[in-house]
Amino acid sequence: MKTIIENHKIPYFDSKQFRTYYEDMRLGVFDIETLGLNPSFCPMILAGFMAVNGDGSVVLKQHFAETPEEEPLLLAKLAEDFNEVDYVLTYNGKHFDIPFVEKRSQRCRFESTMWNIHNLDLYLVLNGHSDLKHQLRNLKQKTVEEYMGLVKSRDDLISGAESVKLYEDYAKCQDASLKAELERQILLHNHDDLLQLYQLLPVLKKADIHKAMYSLGFPIKGLNGWPTLNICKIKISNSSLIIDGKYSGPGFSYISYETFGKSYSCRFNDDNTFTFSLNVIKHKGNLFIHLPYFLADYEELTKFPHYTSDFIIAVQDGKVNHMEVNAFIKAFFRQFMKETSCPL
């Protein structure tokens, strides 16, 4: 296996809404190349990972398996990369890249919890929480690149399916110069996917990011010894706000029950999952979060449109106020981590 490392400088993406969810967190852009779509039979042969710095400089790594038998080495290097960031950016990574890596890890008997990291899947954001699917012929990454004026930034001209054929030719090739050219083409496809994907981030301005984060989840930066928590699922019922998630690193068990002075319960499991249940109040068909029950300081939340007299209106006329609920969840988890010692 070989690792190719390049340094680039690209425009750094920033916006107020983006900072709301990802401020002070380090991003990794992630994409894989495989020998097919079924992880039960098809190995990974290339993993690209690009760590993004605040000044726009990036370190782009490509872990290339010169033979399919080197896949376990590739997985080990990739886990190291994931450990260096707080979340990853993918394009359809929740449905393909991450599940593929998890399955191949199982097949290779490579154990890692790093795949529990938060995944900002740009495809799912655009598909479910923007109007672009009604404006473009499809939501393939290259189509969105064209929409955003990024076509000239791409040197690669092949598809993922063509990359598979190139690798098959590479594996059989005996000519050193031809083999090097095939490798260059395979690497270029993955290389450009990574650079282009990061430069697509401004398309988030076309999406309802608060609704997307409520539906798809967001990370909470670790504090006081706690790992960064990946919020995966949020659900509000007539009596509870339920938050499910995952975390990376060593597994541990921790349980906290609701008491007279504490309006929530939680459980951290040694399989790297967690669940919180917070009480909500139903009044005239609407659902409210009584902030003094959960937060010592909620000054920032008083600025939101759906704040009223120590309450956040979580659901009004059947509609979830995504921005307010997400902001409350972030404030609650930060206070929880500050006040609670991590059992690790």
Image (tube, rainbow, N blue to C red):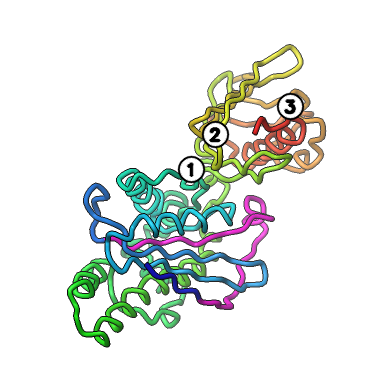
For the question of whether residue 330 can be seen, the reply is yes
Q: Is residue 1 left or right of residue 166?
A: right
> Counting residues from the N terminus, which is met first, the one under dot 3 or under dot 1?
1
Q: Magenta region: which residues?
A: 6-34
Along the line of sight, which residue is nearer the eye, 72 or 221?
Answer: 72
Q: Position of residue 23 (x, y in %)?
A: 67, 55
Rendered location of residue 254, percent (x, y): 61, 24
Q: Determine which residue is flagged by label 3.
A: 294
Disc 2 marks a residue whose amino acid type is Gly
Of callouts 2 and 3, the N-terminal one: 2
Disc 1 packing (10 Å; few <14; some 14–19; many ≥20): some
Q: Is residue 109 above or below residue 336?
A: below
Disc 3 versus disc 1: nearer the observer? 1
Q: Identity of the amino acid at label 1? A: Thr
In the rendered structure, are the residues bearing label 2 and label 1 in contact, judged by CB atoms less than 8 Å apart?
yes
The N terminus lies in quadrant: bottom left
Tag 2's secondary structure? loop
Disc 2 marks which residue? Answer: 251
Residue under label 1:
113
> Could you tell me residue 75's position as x and y percent?
40, 55
Q: Is residue 305 above or below residue 77?
A: above
Q: Amino acid at mark 3?
A: Phe
